[in-house]
Image (cartoon, helix red, strand yellow):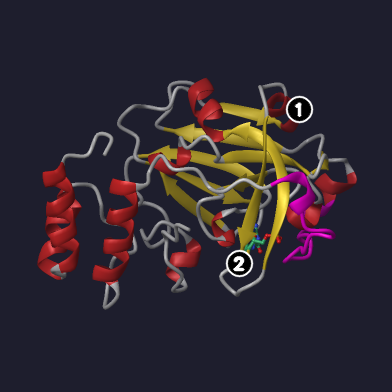
Amino acid sequence: MSGVSRRTLITAGLAAASGAAGLAVAGRSGLIPPDAVGAFAPGTALTYAAQRLLTRHSLAREFRRDQISRPPFANGKPPTIEAFVKHQAEGFAGWRLAVDGMVSRPTTFSVAQLQSYPSRSQITHLACEEGWSFIAEWTGVPLSKVLDVVGAAPQAKYVVYFSIQPTWWDSVDMADALHPQTLLTYGMNGADLPVGHGGPLRVRVPRQLGYKSVKYITRLTVTDSLKGFGKGMGSYAAERGYSWYNGI
Ligand SMILES: Nc1nc2c(c(=O)[nH]1)N[C@H]1C(S)=C(S)[C@@H](COP(=O)(O)O)O[C@H]1N2
Ligand SMILES: [Mo]
């Protein structure tokens, strides 16, 4: 059991299982998700603690090329907001990703700059919380590479990401941010990422449900606390009752 003592595991397991008092213990171990408030807190904390202790390095399943869904289902229509329409008309040449927060070199990247780094492609499943799903090949730069380029501080605990759509922002802990399958994607099924699927730039977190894979990304912030973002629950989705952590 890499890096986790049996005692930590037992403590966190008991903590999560024993409800509110246990939450305080698990919190000191850094195993409380930011939306662990209210009646479901012990349950969501147990899921998160167990996943982080047991499976933080495990890989999401990757599929064969002949398993790619054709045609892929696209959940949303491209944004109609003026700023996006203008970028789209310009072929996204002016699209920028700002990376800031606890980094030694805050940087603004064009899509072309991100494409200049070594890419990773993987065929993974995107599952919506509403029940549908599809398999696609996603190509992009590992988020860990971008965090390395900007010099993310070792004390950082989360990466918060923002879409050009103001209500779509979310965050992951460093275990998911540094995970080799977490990508900033710009390609899908061998072509540019279609706008319906988040082009020109989308976070893919294949170890969590679809809504963590936010489309039309314009900014990443590295932080040690989620308190200053919205209501402090880690995402807009969490503020609307979806769980912040939804590992699959
Ligand atoms: N910016 C933005 N990101 C988003 C969404 C959205 O509406 N806007 N929908 C989310 C949800 S609920 C799901 S299930 C997936 C759907 O991915 P798809 O459009 O590639 O099918 O995108 C997620 N990311
Ligand atoms: Mo979804």
Task: Describe the element under mark 2 as helix, strand or loop.
Answer: loop
Outermost residue toward the right? 89
In the picture provided, is 246 more to the left or to the right than 232?
right
Where ligand 1 lies, by image quadrant? bottom right
Q: What is the quadrant of residue 218 in the picture? A: top right
Q: Which residues are magenta?
A: 64-85
From the top left corner, tell me how far across and down residue 182 is, in percent. 55, 41
Residue at numbered disc 1: 112
What residue sits 64% from the left and 36% below the top? Answer: 97
> What's the residue at 28%, 62% (across, down)?
45
Q: Earlier in the sequence, mark 1 or mark 2?
A: 1
Q: Which numbered disc covers residue 128?
A: 2
Report the residue at 25% width, 51% height from top.
31
Q: Say whether residue 143 is magenta.
A: no
Q: Is residue 83 magenta?
A: yes
Decide: is 62 above or below 240.
above
**Can the viewer see residue 7?**
yes
**Assess mark 2: CB under 8 A from ligand 1?**
yes
Q: Give the x, y percent position of residue 27.
A: 19, 53
What amino acid does circle 2 point to? Cys
Kindly identify the residue that appears in the image at 23 percent across and 47 percent down. 30
